[in-house]
Amino acid sequence: MCTSIHRHSLHCILPPYILSQIAENGSPEMRAMAIRSLLVDPTIRIVRASTAGPVAGEIARRRAAAGNILAPSPLRTIRDAGGEPEAPGATVVRREGDGPTGDVAADEAYDGLGATFALFWEAYRRNSIDDAGLPLDATVHYDQDYDNAFWDGTQMVFGDGDGELFNRFTISLDVIGHELTHGVTEKEAGLAYFNQSGALNESISDVFGSLVKQRLLGQTAEEADWLIGAGLLTPKVNGSALRSMKAPGTAYDDPVLGKDPQPGHMDDFIRTNQDNGGVHVNSGIPNRAFYLAATTIGGNSWERAGQIWYNALLDPNTRANTDFAGFARVTIDVAGRLYGSGSAEATAVTEAWSAVGVI
Amino acid sequence: MQTGKASDETVTGEARVRIEGGLAHFPGLAKEQTVSFHDLASPERRELATLADKADFFDCTPANETARPDARTYTVGLTIDGRSREIRVAEPIRDPAMAKLVSVVRRLSKQHSVGR
């Protein structure tokens, strides 16, 4: 709406499609003005929706030739299921660009999706889940007393927890990053969700979930807690989180939940038919390998260690049935390609996998 | 109300659920929970029976879907008035009636199990 004095009449006179043209093709000054107009215009949602995704063809070639690649932005939609077991939820409570709703779960989901999008774009130049600007959807308040969060193939779904054992599942930023990373893995290596490839799938979600949190908090590998789901368990539970990447098997030991069963070494690998072949159990082994590699390399984990794991996930040698040893080989190869075969990074990765008994 | 109560008392049976998967694996939660209709209030019995009908629980063809990452798989068993069946459903449960039935079975089984 035009209710205030504007610095330039462009704000009100021109419809969004013309502003978009100017943003694409105008002089630098006009482009900046048009982009500012689009950002303050309520129709930004529509424009963003229509421009999210791959920009191909002539426009893409012109942009690339001019070195003019616009930074993508997330396109988030948060829905409220109102305690019903339905996803997507019936009510849209927050769209991209909207201010906070006051609903803690909805706002945590919105912010968590944004932090995850930021990690993948700013650290790895990946534009959303599919690297093509896929809109990020989430449903909160799913079902009643629902103690879970999952990726359903198109969106993230979060329960509020039962309040007895679990708090709301949006409370942990790394859990949001974890769920979204499942979408990335599905689009890339497509690791099959059972046995070792499934545990690797889980581990990769833990790795990037933790990196989302570490990056937002500005923590180095040494400073990070390496916990997945810290804050998720209520004070009634004897435990600190769902998993510990640093010390698998130590996250909880509780009369109701039982003891954290995660192994941190292949000697303790668990063969089971439960949990899709122990995907949430044996993921402790590659989790610890990443922790060891990241802390040995030092600094910010999302930088060199994260680059190695991210590029390994995209490597054609990582396939649906890749096991721990196969992925270890890929990460070592990638570290050699990125930093040199005799580099400190490649050595750290090799020694990390060796320390957990994978190679 | 008297008519409803008499009608409810004729509904006998039990509900069972075993949950696998989820964001984490908790050994203590990975066991079957059962609730007898004797332990349920009349509205709860009535709700279960109604939902079982709506979901066509005893005659439906279960969707053969594999679990998505962190999604749960429910093995739900119902015995109502002598009819008994056990089916396995994975999230996301697309049929709203079945999703509601699974939700109610899960919550009632948990409420009536031995707590902390």
Image (spheres, coloured by chain):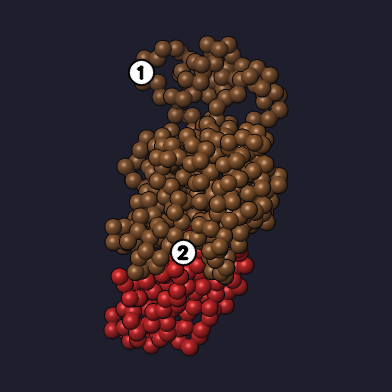
Left or right for A354, reference B26: right
Residue A193 placed where, x, y %? 60, 58
Q: Chain of mark 1?
A: A
- For label 1, the crowd category at 10 Å Cα-Cα, with few meaning under 14, some 14 to 19 and many 20 or more, is few
- Image point (43%, 62%), residue name: A260
Q: Taking the image as drawn, is residue A150 in sight? A: yes
Residue B96 placed where, x, y %? 49, 63
The N terminus of chain A sits in image quarter: top left
- Image point (54%, 16%), residue name: A31
Q: Examine the rendered structure and indicate whether residue A239 appears above or below residue A207.
A: below
Q: Taking the image as drawn, is residue A113 in sight? A: no
Chain coloured brown here:
A
Residue A4: image tag: 1
Q: Name the amino acid type tagged 1.
A: Ser
The label nearer to you, 1 versus 2, is 2
- Residue wearing tag 2: A261
Q: Nearer the viewer, residue B69 or A137?
A: B69
Chain B, colour shown? red
**What secondary structure is marked by label 2?**
loop
Q: Earlier in the sequence, mark 1 or mark 2?
A: 1
Residue A129: image tag: none
Q: Examine the rendered structure and indicate whether residue A240 appears above or below residue A348.
A: below
